[in-house]
Image (tube, rainbow, N blue to C red):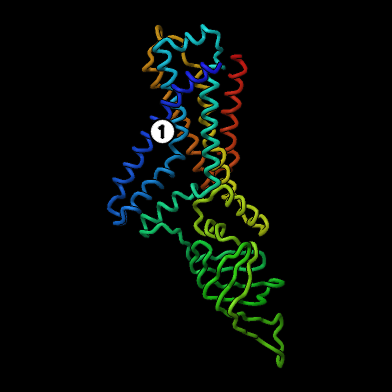
Amino acid sequence: MGVFFYFISTIYLKNFFILFFALLGFYCGVDMLLNFKDLPDSANLILLYVLFVGFSAVTYILPISLIFSLVLSFLTMIRNNELVSLYALGLSKNRVVIYPFLWALFFCFIYVGFNFTSFAYANEFKRSILNNGTLNKKSGDIFLKFNEEFVYVKSLDDGLAREIKIFALKDENLSHFIQANRALFNEDSWLLRDGNITHIPQKFVLGENGYKSENFTSLEALEGFKPKVAQSVASGREYSIYDAYQSLVLFNSQELNTRNLKITLYKLIFAPFFAPFLMLIMYYYFPAIARFFNLAFIAFIAFIVTLVVWGGLFVLLRLSENGVISGEFGIILPNLLLAFAALVMLFKKR
């Protein structure tokens, strides 16, 4: 079996990498032509911009490359009579297709693993270089609710907050107000520097103490308020899987709407997995020999089916993001249906 694994995997992986990098280069080239006049003068930033464009393109290119490479690989094997030879040597249809299927699953899991890292923020870094001429992903004018406090931050950049204001509530009344020129995130809390705190009495009684204000040089506050979560919530665009999960936990604790966060998690985890299952479904419709079939027409139909399915799933994803349908219906259900159909065909062809 090792010989067959090497033979089939070599053909599939060669076509996959050729298609993947060709489509990646085409995507980056078109993006550079459209945005070249807006790029900064720094050669380093231009190279980084191209890198982040490539990272952001993987979301769209990876599933297409996985399917197209399967189509090209097996049509080549059919044309050279290699596929029918494999069947003649005793390999079942399932044994032949299982190697490309496992490779496709492997690349999908690699993609999901990358989405736990800063790879998921490639679009944000790309926009930062294009719009601001810098790599730093800064967030500004953040206003969030955290536990019983409302937090405003003028600017936030990698754990450094400037002009931070905290409005603390007690029994739905403002109990105290904190403002500081800057704050540093330290392990799990924020260290506020050079500010003041104003205490507000719960009841205003004539003759008794009123407002009380005092300055401080250092004050610890906002335990558990993580900067990455704040930046992601403020931008409302990109999350890594870990940050999306942390934001989901935070939003649940604050009893806030978590629909967008769930859709983001579904997109990062489930979206590319339609490709391996669509590969299985399409494979069982390939002929064993080319004598009685027009392979060019079969390739054309396979490419059209792939683009139609991918386009339909993309539309469902956009509808989910816009709140027209639920994320479970628009993202998870189509993948489950494809997986069910593929597994049914897999067991029928044993």
Q: Is residue 177 above or below residue 280?
A: below
Q: Quadrant of residue 225?
A: bottom right
Q: Determine whether the residue tagged by mark 1 lies in a helix, strand or loop.
A: helix
| Image location of residue 270, percent across then percent down | 56, 38
Residue 264 seen in this snapshot: no
Label 1 CA crowd tier, 10 Å (few <14, some 14–19, many 20+): many
| Image location of residue 15, percent across then percent down | 41, 26
Q: Residue at x 59, y 83 (%)?
A: 215
The residue under label 1 is which amino acid type?
Phe
Direction from residue 344 to residue 304 in the image, left or right: left
| Image location of residue 40, percent across then percent down | 31, 56
Residue in the foreground of this view, choosing between 336 and 229: 229
| Image location of residue 334, percent across then percent down | 56, 33
Residue 180 seen in this snapshot: yes
Q: Is residue 217 above or below residue 258?
A: below
Q: Count how many numbered circles sit on residues in the image.
A: 1
Q: Residue at x 42, y 26 (%)?
A: 14
Q: What residue is pinned by disc 1?
A: 20
Residue in the foreground of this view, choosing between 295 and 316: 295
Direction front: furthest residue: 2
Quadrant the C terminus occupies: top right
Direction from residue 323 to residue 81 in the image, left or right: left
Quadrant the N terminus occupies: top right
